[in-house]
Image (cartoon, grey):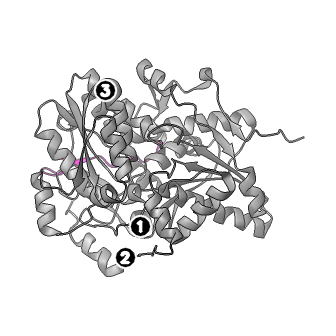
């Protein structure tokens, strides 16, 4: 007799992970190293420590240790909002009439509204431990900036946030949450940095991008004594911290005998997708199990599905190290779509390598189809999803409908990274039939590729 699966599965405090999992340790082909753009040589710990906290720089360069102990202070902070529930989407299954079983890992049960707090608290902890005054960062939709503001407030650190201009204007309440937690928030690109002024001169009236905001945040960090830069996605250290998502999910699945066939996550820089799939990918790499992994990205910013796998700058201002990744070119400025956290020109080097090896697949979806799925999910499952997460919902629904056609009883798991309560301008546009889709032409993408570094 099949075991009855609760609507929401919570782990006990004793079952919470005590270590992060580093998928790089199990990868047969390691991600290509970060390069110093001045020398085209792999960056050293000393060089990386000029930008990041020393301990975080060590984590960034660690390809060998599979498990890293989570400091007790971080474990205690996690207990404020973790474990996050693994939810069986019974209502969605019924509404779709599918034989598929659908689960989602919900990361929105905290004030930041997303999974971002998992890494922000870790990065703030190491900054405080190093004796720094504060940190600088960028944010797209504002979830990462909010999470970092909360973490910095907890550790009494100064927090300077450069927020992508279109999101700064679209999401004023997200901005005010950051300010409530003590952060200084600047729309990017801005006149406050040299690189910001250069970007504005080259792209007058631009709505900005994560690449622009990263450049400004890095400049701000390296020109202010006692500050370091922290990043909410893309970096290997962030995927490491976010592995808490996948570890909890795997423990819950094992506890109830749940065996996912398909694991889906939205993909911008790769933090939530990497965090969700890493432990499962480890099993696949070790030959212990097999899964179909699907990364879902916006059609307006299709780094995996239409990008090139080459070395590129992580930022528009070209002040960061070079990373080998799927990229549209650091100068690519995506259209101002409503999934701000996915408007990044590149992808995590870890996920890029896994994708290049054929260990996961990628799909791009248009935003009107995404918001159709978001609205359906909100009405059926009762949670208003973030636009970013709704990319994963779109493909999860598509896969469930395929099962309806074929009669296959597959188990689908996706990441619901956060809530959409600060994204009401986007929902308003959709509800008023004012939302449009934009897919860049090959000619537009070629402009971004034309300025790729010669490495």
Picture quadrant where residue 356 is located: bottom left
Q: Residue at x 37, y 76 (%)?
A: 440
**Which type of secondary structure does the marked residue at label 1 adopt?**
loop
| First-in-chain label (2 vs 1) | 1
**Residue nearest the observer in this picture, 128 or 240:** 128
Vertical position of residue 234 compared to residue 441: above or below = above
To which quarter of the image does residue 220 belong?
top left
Question: Could you tell me which residue is drawn at 79 percent across and 59 percent down?
Answer: 99
Task: Residue at 45% x, 63% y: name it.
Answer: 426
Could you say where residue 13 lies in the image, as x and y percent from the top left?
60, 22
First in sequence: mark 3 or mark 1? 3
Query: Can residue 34 be found in the magenta stretch?
Result: yes
Percent position of residue 170, x then y: 36, 59
Residue 347, above or below 259: below
Does the magenta run of residues contain 241?
Answer: no
Locate residue 126 relative to residue 2 in the image: left or right.
left
Answer yes or no: is residue 410 visible.
no
Q: Is residue 288 above or below residue 374?
A: above
Which residue shows up at 15% across the image and 64% down it?
A: 200
Residues at circles 2 and 1 in contact by the CB criterion of under 8 Å? yes
Badge 3 density bin: few <14, some 14–19, many ≥20, Cα 10 Å? some
CA gap, disc 2 to disc 1? 9 Å
Quarter-wise, where is residue 54 in the image? top left
Residue identifier under label 1: 302
Question: The C terminus is located in which quarter?
Answer: bottom left
Q: How many numbered dots are placed on residues in this image?
A: 3
Q: Which residue is mark 3?
A: 126
């Amino acid at each position: 007799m099949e075991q009855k699966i609760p609507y929401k599965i919570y782990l006990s405090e004793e079952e919470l992970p005590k270590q992060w999992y580093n998928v790089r340790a199990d990868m047969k082909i390691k991600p290509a190293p970060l390069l110093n753009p001045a020398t085209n040589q792999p960056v050293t710990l000393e060089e990386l420590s000029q930008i990041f906290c020393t301990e975080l720089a060590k984590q960034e360069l660690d390809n060998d240790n599979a498990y890293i102990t989570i400091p007790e202070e971080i474990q205690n902070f996690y207990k404020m909002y973790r474990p996050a529930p693994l939810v069986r989407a019974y209502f969605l299954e019924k509404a779709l009439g599918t034989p598929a079983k659908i689960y989602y890992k919900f990361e929105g049960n905290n004030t930041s509204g997303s999974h971002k707090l998992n890494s922000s608290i870790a990065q703030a902890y190491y900054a405080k431990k190093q004796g720094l005054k504060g940190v600088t960062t960028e944010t797209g939709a504002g979830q990462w900036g909010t999470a970092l503001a909360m973490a910095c407030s907890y550790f009494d650190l100064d927090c300077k946030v450069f927020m992508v201009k279109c999101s700064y204007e679209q999401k004023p309440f997200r901005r005010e949450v950051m300010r409530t937690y003590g952060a200084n928030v600047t729309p990017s690109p801005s006149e406050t940095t040299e690189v910001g002024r250069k970007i504005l001169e080259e792209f007058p009236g631009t709505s900005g991008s994560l690449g622009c905001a990263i450049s400004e945040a890095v400049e701000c960090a390296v020109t202010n004594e006692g500050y370091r830069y922290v990043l909410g996605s893309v970096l290997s250290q962030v995927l490491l911290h976010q592995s808490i998502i996948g570890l909890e999910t795997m423990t819950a699945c094992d506890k109830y005998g749940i065996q996912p066939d398909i694991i889906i996550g939205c993909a911008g820089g790769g933090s939530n997708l990497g965090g969700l799939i890493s432990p499962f990918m480890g099993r696949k790499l070790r030959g212990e199990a097999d899964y179909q992994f699907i990364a879902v990205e916006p059609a307006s910013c299709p780094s995996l599905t239409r990008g090139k796998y080459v070395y590129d700058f992580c930022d528009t201002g070209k002040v960061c190290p070079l990373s080998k990744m799927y990229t549209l070119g650091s100068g690519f400025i995506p259209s101002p779509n409503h999934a701000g956290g996915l408007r990044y020109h590149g992808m995590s080097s870890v996920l890029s390598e896994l994708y290049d090896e054929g260990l996961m697949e990628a799909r791009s979806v248009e935003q009107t189809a995404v918001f159709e799925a978001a609205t359906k999910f909100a009405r059926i499952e009762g949670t208003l999803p973030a636009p970013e997460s709704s990319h994963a919902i779109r493909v999860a629904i598509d896969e469930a409908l395929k099962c309806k056609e074929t009669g296959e009883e597959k188990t689908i798991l996706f990441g619901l990274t956060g809530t959409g309560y600060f994204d009401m301008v986007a929902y308003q546009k959709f509800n008023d039939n004012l939302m449009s889709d934009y897919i860049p032409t090959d000619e537009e993408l070629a402009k971004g590729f034309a300025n790729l570094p010669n490495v």
